[in-house]
């Protein structure tokens, strides 16, 4: 076993989505996830420094990334199904916290039947890991919550596959930041009419819709899909606060699935753990070549700041992944 001291943690939507609250039925148990009870430690993506080791695999001073209960200090085993991953010295702690979002985006885009834009045979093995080097006929892709951790990565990966990428975010300020990441066009849904702007920006229709939001944005995007288009839902951020009440907005444009022969699917990273090593290799290659930029909002403080960061995640005032770095204590 090893004892680690947490030095940074990523703030993710599942924090609120999987709380055990009356009526909060999100299907967590059916997919092997355990609900978090009020008063229990929250499971988080975190990076820690090894301060004591009883394992030959880890040394004191190593930085490790893992998914574990959020404590200032945590004891971990080295023989579990997903042991802590040692971080190379050249990988910054904050960048490592963004990598989980990159894994989701990469695996969806290269392996999911509703997220791919290239030939499935190009998405396996080493050729799949480096498939961003092969240009494909241009497809038009819509990414919602594009200024979020997963969306900002997804837009860049689609762009490097030769796609025309449209990103949806809340404000023009964040929309301009997305342009800096290479998005072809952006829509600020709080300041612009999403339906009208999609008509202007994608008169040809959408080939792929990478949805992180659901509700109204899923409805509007569905109206602009091409015949045979594909929708992959990676998250439904607009519904999280509705889970406990049961007042789910839902997908009201589902009738277009039949009329336009749409392919629709969902994605959860924990169901695709075997693909993580290949995805990690590809992401590191892209970053080394300067083809992929991370987006993060860094907050410094102690664990008392954590709940504030969760609220900021759902308020939409941040760009990229929110990372809480814990201040050193004497």
Image (spheres, rainbow, N blue to C red):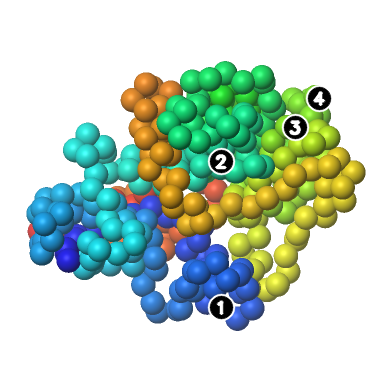
Residue at 75 percent across and 44 percent down: it is 263
Q: Residues within 10 Å of mark 1 (few under 14, many from 20)?
A: some
Q: Quadrant of residue 276?
A: top left
Q: Give yes or no for contact between labels 2 and 1 (Cβ–Cβ under 8 Å).
A: no
Foreground disc of the pair 2, 3: 2
Q: Is residue 304 left or right of residue 102?
A: left
Q: Residues within 10 Å of mark 2 (few under 14, many from 20)?
A: many
Tag shown at residue 111: 2
Disc on the earlier residue, 2 or 3: 2
Q: Nearer the viewer, residue 208 or 172?
A: 208
- Find the distance from the CA under tag 1 to the CA under tag 4: 43 Å
Residue 273 visible in the displayed image: yes
Tag shown at residue 78: none
Q: Nearer the viewer, residue 280 or 195?
A: 280
Residue at the disc numbered 1: 21
Residue at the disc numbered 4: 203
Residue at 27 percent across and 51 percent down: it is 85
Q: Is residue 64 left or right of residue 143?
A: left
- Point out residue 209 in the picture as x, y percentages from the top left corner: 69, 39
């Amino acid at each position: 076993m090893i004892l680690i001291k947490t030095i940074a943690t990523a703030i993710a939507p599942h924090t609120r989505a999987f709380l055990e609250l009356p009526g909060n039925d999100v299907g967590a148990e059916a997919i092997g996830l355990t609900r978090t009870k009020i008063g229990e430690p929250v499971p988080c993506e975190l990076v820690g420094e090894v301060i004591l080791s009883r394992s030959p695999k880890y040394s004191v001073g190593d930085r490790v990334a893992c998914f574990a209960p959020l404590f200032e200090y945590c004891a971990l085993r080295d023989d579990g199904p997903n042991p802590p991953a040692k971080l190379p010295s050249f990988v910054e702690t904050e960048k490592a916290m963004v990598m989980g979002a990159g894994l989701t985006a990469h695996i969806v885009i290269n392996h999911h039947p509703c997220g791919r834009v290239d030939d499935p045979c190009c998405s396996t093995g080493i050729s799949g890991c480096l498939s961003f080097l092969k240009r494909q006929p241009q497809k038009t892709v819509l990414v919602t919550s594009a200024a979020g951790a997963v969306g900002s990565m997804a837009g860049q990966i689609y762009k490097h596959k030769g796609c025309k990428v449209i990103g949806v975010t809340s404000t023009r300020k964040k929309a301009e930041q997305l342009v800096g990441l290479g998005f072809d066009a952006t829509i600020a849904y709080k300041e612009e009419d999403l339906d009208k702007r999609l008509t202007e920006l994608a008169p040809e229709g959408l080939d792929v819709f990478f949805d992180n939001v659901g509700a109204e944005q899923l409805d509007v995007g569905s109206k602009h899909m091409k015949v045979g288009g594909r929708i992959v839902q990676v998250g439904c951020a607009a519904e999280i606060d509705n889970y406990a009440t049961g007042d789910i907005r839902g997908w009201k444009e589902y009738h277009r699935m039949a009329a336009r022969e749409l392919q629709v699917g969902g994605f959860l990273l924990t169901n695709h753990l075997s693909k993580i090593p290949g995805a990690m290799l590809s992401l590191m290659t892209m970053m080394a070549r300067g083809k992929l930029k991370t987006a993060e909002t860094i907050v410094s403080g102690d664990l008392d700041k954590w709940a504030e960061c969760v609220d900021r995640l759902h308020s939409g005032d941040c760009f990229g992944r929110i990372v809480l770095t814990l201040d050193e204590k004497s």
